[in-house]
Amino acid sequence: MCKIPKISNAEWEVMKIIWNNPQITAVSIIQVLKNKCEWKPATVKSLINRLLNKKVIGFNKSGNEYFYFPLISEDECIKLESQSFLDRVFNGSMKSMLLTFVESKEISERDIEELKSILNQSNKKKG
């Protein structure tokens, strides 16, 4: 995996829109965020510029419009962010994280059963 720059929470909101709508304009991004956030258009444009500077998104220009698209997949960013969270909060211990969720009742019985199934499948692939 290549080095992916850290993406702020606000930038994540913009990225989610771009991942779901590659080749989207700033005006369209602003419209989508208008329903979720109370950000001014200038704020959204600043976030877009930060993402461009980080080389997380690119653009195509057609006439006077810029169409933004992701340069990094959502899966790559999720994996990086998940590992960063695991390292930062649980010193890299998946076991500690899962125990915390299970013991705090943040995870349902159904989720536990699904996790067991996923872990069993993972073991079968390794074995």
Image: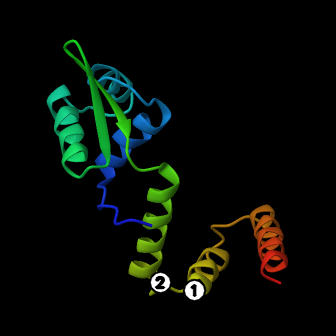
Relative to the observer, which residue lies in front, 127 or 13? 127
Above or below — where is 48 with respect to 118? Answer: above
Image quadrant assignment for residue 7 = bottom left
Q: What's the residue type where badge 1 is placed?
A: Ser
Q: Secondary structure at mark 1?
A: helix
Above or below — where is 44 with respect to 8? Answer: above
Q: List the residue tagged with mark 2.
A: 90
**In the rendered view, how is the structure colored?**
rainbow
Residue 108 image position (x, y, % from top left): 73, 64
Q: Residue at x 83, y 84 (%)?
A: 127
Q: Residue at x 61, y 75 (%)?
A: 104
Q: Residue at x 82, y 71 (%)?
A: 121
Q: Residues within 10 Å of mark 2 (few under 14, many from 20)?
A: some
Above or below — where is 46 with respect to 9? Answer: above
Q: Are marks 1 and 2 in contact (CB under 8 Å)?
A: yes
Q: What's the residue type where badge 2 is placed?
A: Phe
Residue 84 image position (x, y, % from top left): 41, 73
Residue 30 image position (x, y, % from top left): 29, 25
Relative to the observer, which residue lies in front, 99 or 2? 2
Q: List the residue tagged with mark 1.
A: 96
